[in-house]
Image (cartoon, rainbow, N blue to C red):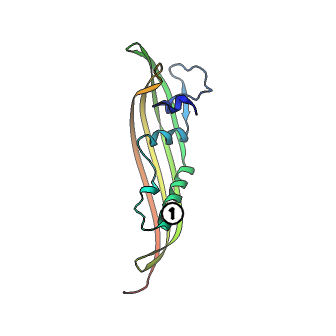
Amino acid sequence: GDQRIDAFGGWFLPPPESAEVAPGARWELTKERWNDFLRMGGEFWVDAADADAPDEEHAAHVRDFEGQLLRNGESDLVCWLAAVEAEDGERVAVIGFEGTLDSHAKQDYTSDFDGTRGEVSARVEHEMRIEGSCRFDLDAGRALSIETGIAITTTITERTTQESKGPR
């Protein structure tokens, strides 16, 4: 892969095919780069391996949900070069970023839990509003700091139809 992106903080750098950028230059941040940044501190989406799943069938539903959230993601994330500063003899790029990352997932399945069988239809809509900055040491090839503000809105709509097998 691109070694600049593999470096800590490289997610916010302009694409490698970009010409030399000057302060004020803007570029889009792909959802793949944003997902990579979010994974730096752990999984952002539901992690099926850690799910409190009563059985393998439920775990499979969680994995499917996670896959849908990743595939259905849409981003409108923009970065810009605010400045290049000298700090302790090094060149430091100050990069701002902001935008939204939206996704959704839907599932229909049959649940059979503790004597109750039901049809479940669930939809999750997830929106993140992101803003922040990255101070990237151009000479060392790594971020000195990343400040991020994230506001998350999640809407879950579930419809369940249940039938009970009666008392035990």
> Percent x, y for residue 16?
59, 27
Q: x, y percentage for residue 152? A: 41, 47
Q: Determine whether 167 is above or below 97 in the image.
A: below
Q: Which residue is mark 1?
A: 61
Residue 149, above or below 46: above
Residue that appears at 42% across and 80% down: 115
Q: Is residue 64 left or right of residue 148?
A: right
Q: Is residue 12 left or right of residue 150?
A: right
Quarter of the figure with the C terminus:
bottom left
Give above or below for 46 relative to 32.
Answer: below
**Structural crowding at the residue carrying mark 1, measured as other residues with C-alpha within 10 Å and reported as few (<14), some (14–19) or many (≥20):** some
Where's residue 17, x and y in %? 63, 26
> Which of the pair 31/62 is nearer the observer?
62
Residue type, mark 1 in image: His
Give the image quarter of residue 55.
bottom left
**Front residue of this view, candidates 51 and 94:** 51
Write the residue at 58% across / 34% down.
Answer: 1
Question: Horizontally, is 50 left or right of 80 in the view?
Answer: left
Q: Residue at x 39, y 36 (%)?
A: 148
